[in-house]
Amino acid sequence: MTKPNVHAVHRDWDRPFPAVARTEGIYLYDENGKKYIDGSGGSSVVTSIGHGVSEIAQVMFDQAQKFSFYPAHAFTNERFLDLCDLVVSLAPGGLKDNSRVWITCTGTDATDDAVRLARQYWVECDRPSKYMVVGRWQGFHGNNLAVAGFSGITSRRRIFQPMFVESPHLPPAFCYRCSLEKTYPECGLLCARMLETIIRQHGADNIAAFIAEPVVGAALGCAPAPDGYFQVIRQICDRYEILFIDDEVMTGWGRTGAAWGIDHWGVTPDIIATAKGMTAGYTPLSAVIARDDIWGALERNHSPFKAGHTLNANVVSCAGAIAVINYSLDHRLSLNSRMRGEQALAGLREMMNRHPILGDVRGKGLMFGFEFVQDRQTKETFPPRLGVSSRFEQFALRRGLVTYPCTGTVDGVLGDMTLMAPPLTISSQEMDELLAILDAALSDLELNLEISA
Ligand SMILES: Cc1ncc(COP(=O)(O)O)c(C=O)c1O
């Protein structure tokens, strides 16, 4: 039995949290020996290479024995330099071999610093009026007070709203529930073209950057933008001199079946924020990758980047990141992500035949999700008080599968969905096992809600 909790604050007050005793591959084991599939890849989309890979622990242990910390205002370290070289060699499109890298701690640090870099770039270029960041509703970029402002995840914004700086928001690129009530492709990608409207409304001279996730994770339950979306965004950003920040915190490192999420659109961003799968949860680390000439504007003015945390570029984390990235490449995990992702979507689409509660299944690679509806034709959602996605999470957990519940797909409040992102190492048999548990848990939920096929 886990010892009683007296002093620790968990993410929820009203439910027990079993203690993890050990992990291996795609599995977690609690202290009673119960086995769970890590179906959401941590909380969430983190555990890219799977749990318990001893060579990663060994590399970090070896580094920690040499040294694990040093005064970063006075020294550098070779693992940091190696990691930056490796990242630049793997960067997408025109950033490959044409970028520089800033290493920090969390995904939020990376998006926050990406925006800081955009702002500082314009100041260094003598265009100090450019400060605004355009985000999207139902987009998520992290959890500090600046980032929550340009994020569009309603449940995490509401009580902090008075503390945000003004950030215009585009509607989400979400064809299943288009908030503009259009149909793709007849819409001509109005949701992307509206960036131009926002720029005109606020003035290009006031806007520093636009930020978006290629596949929206927690806020939409793994919704990829439609084909052509980021090409339109890129053109508009170029036309109005707005930097395009690509949030690859979830979608990087093979998660979507391509090296980078943005590869599906063949577009080069100006700045990338990435984290999660880069160290697979073995250690905290994140990165900002930006075009060489963006950093060059700061360098030319001898102006250090005005960001940074005490634990940035921690040497043990840098060693861990190099080992995780090399493991992903050696095991061709991006390819496995694509194949197992296709298997997952096919399995879920087949389940739609017997589970009327499934309104939509979607995703790219091993970042996939599904949405619950009362009625598939009308797409009517369940009342939030029923907590449908959380109920589903509990049914799946009882059966030994961790899922990630999300809400707010319609308007930030209404709508229940589930995000799935198992380790990219998952085998075909393990995926069958995962799908069988999903199937059974969907039946549990339907029984509980008195829904019949
Ligand atoms: C797309 C995206 N960006 C940024 C973040 C923030 O990352 P972190 O939780 O590591 O701060 C998240 C976290 O889930 C995310 O999904």
Image (cartoon, rainbow, N blue to C red):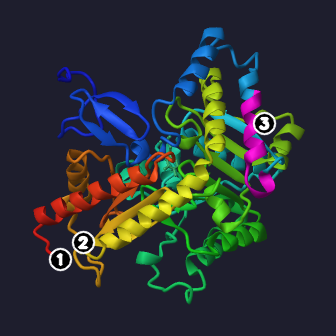
Pick the front one: 60 or 73 = 60
* Between discs 3 and 2, the one toward the N terminus: 3
Label 1–label 3 contact, CB within 8 A: no
Whether the residues at callouts 2 and 1 have beta carbons within 8 Å, the answer is yes
**Mark 1: which secondary structure?**
loop
Q: Which mark, residue 355? A: 2
For badge 3, the amino acid type reads Asp
Q: Does the Cβ of the disc 3 residue fall within 8 Å of ligand 1? A: no
Q: Is mark 3 on a helix, strand or loop?
A: helix
Marks 3 and 2 close (CB-CB < 8 Å): no
Identify the mark at residue 197; answer none if there is no mark. none
Q: Residue furthest right?
A: 300
Q: In which quarter of the image is the N terminus?
A: top left
Look at label 2 and name its amino acid: His
Mark whose residue sits in front, 3 or 2: 2
Q: Give the range drawn in magenta.
A: 81-95
Residue sitting at x 43%, y 66%: 345
Picture coordinates of residue 100, whole percent (x, y): 78, 41
Residue density around tag 1, few if under 14, some if 14–19, many if 20 or more, within 10 Å: few
Where residue 329 appears, as percent x and y from the top left, is 66, 43
Viewed as shown, does residue 139 lie left or right of 69?
left
Question: From this viewpoint, is residue 153 visible?
Answer: yes
